[in-house]
């Protein structure tokens, strides 16, 4: 009888620890995405200043500037992680274009405000990259715990679902920006 109680207690403790471990990893994933969200918001806060600074110099690049503004608005309205990831990928491509095109405008490159905004944006992009890496590491740890034995038993009982990695899905975002003058 005593052995049966010990075995039952061990099983109950195992379920509790496994469940709590899964919840902890799941919350880690949510926190990691929250960090990406904070950095993306920081980048989006810089965009109006960047667009205003660049507007006067890049009149014939207005299509790119309008796209950046539209993406910023769409990102603010996005509800799901997937939508935000897609909009972020599009915005990254548009920002690369602005930075590459700015090379052809010596007056713009010499502008103090533009230089400061460019540096802030560069720092923010580095933080976004780090946050994406941290998020993907958190998702990988969480998803691995969902698939490995014996925690996969608890995961299926309590209906834990895998999370998606933060990936670049748009081939255009992967390409180098081509600048022609």
Image (spheres, rainbow, N blue to C red):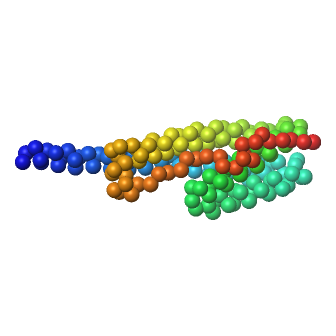
* Residue 62, horizontal then vertical, whole percent: 85, 55
Q: Residue, x 72% and y 43% (percent of image)?
A: 174
Is residue 42 among what the camera can see? no
**Residue 135 falls left or right of residue 105:** left
Return the x and y of residue 181 as percentages of the image width and height: 93, 42
Q: Position of residue 147 (x, y in %)?
A: 42, 46
Q: Residue furthest right?
A: 181
Q: Residue visible at 41% across and 47% down?
A: 146
Question: Residue 76, relative to residue 111: is it above or below?
Answer: below
Left or right: 20, with 80 as reference point: left
The residue lying at 32 percent from left, 46 percent from top is: 18
Given residues 84 and 176, the one toward you in this image is: 176
In this rendering, would 124 be left or right of 95? left
- For the question of whether residue 125 can be seen, the reply is yes
Residue 177 in picture, x, y percent from top left: 80, 42
In this rendering, position of residue 150 left or right of residue 85? left
> Of residues 41 and 28, which is closer to you in this image?
28
Count of numbered badges drawn on the protein: 0
Q: Residue furthest left?
A: 1
Residue at 62%, 52% (x, y): give it. 85
């Amino acid at each position: 009888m005593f052995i049966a109680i010990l075995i039952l207690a061990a099983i109950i403790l195992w379920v509790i620890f496994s469940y709590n471990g899964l919840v902890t990893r799941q919350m880690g994933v949510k926190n990691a995405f929250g960090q990406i969200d904070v950095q993306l918001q920081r980048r989006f806060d810089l965009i109006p200043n960047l667009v205003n600074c660049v507007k006067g110099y890049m009149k014939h690049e207005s299509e790119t500037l309008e796209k950046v503004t539209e993406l910023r608005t769409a990102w603010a309205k996005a509800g799901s992680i997937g939508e935000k990831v897609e909009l972020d990928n599009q915005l990254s491509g548009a920002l690369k274009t602005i930075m590459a095109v700015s090379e052809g405008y010596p007056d713009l490159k010499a502008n103090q405000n533009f230089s400061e905004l460019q540096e802030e944006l560069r720092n923010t992009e580095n933080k976004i990259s780090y946050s994406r890496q941290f998020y993907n590491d958190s998702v990988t740890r969480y998803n691995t715990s969902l698939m490995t034995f014996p925690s996969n038993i608890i995961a299926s009982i309590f209906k834990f679902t895998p999370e998606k990695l933060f990936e670049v899905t748009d081939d255009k975002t992967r390409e180098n920006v081509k600048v022609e003058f």
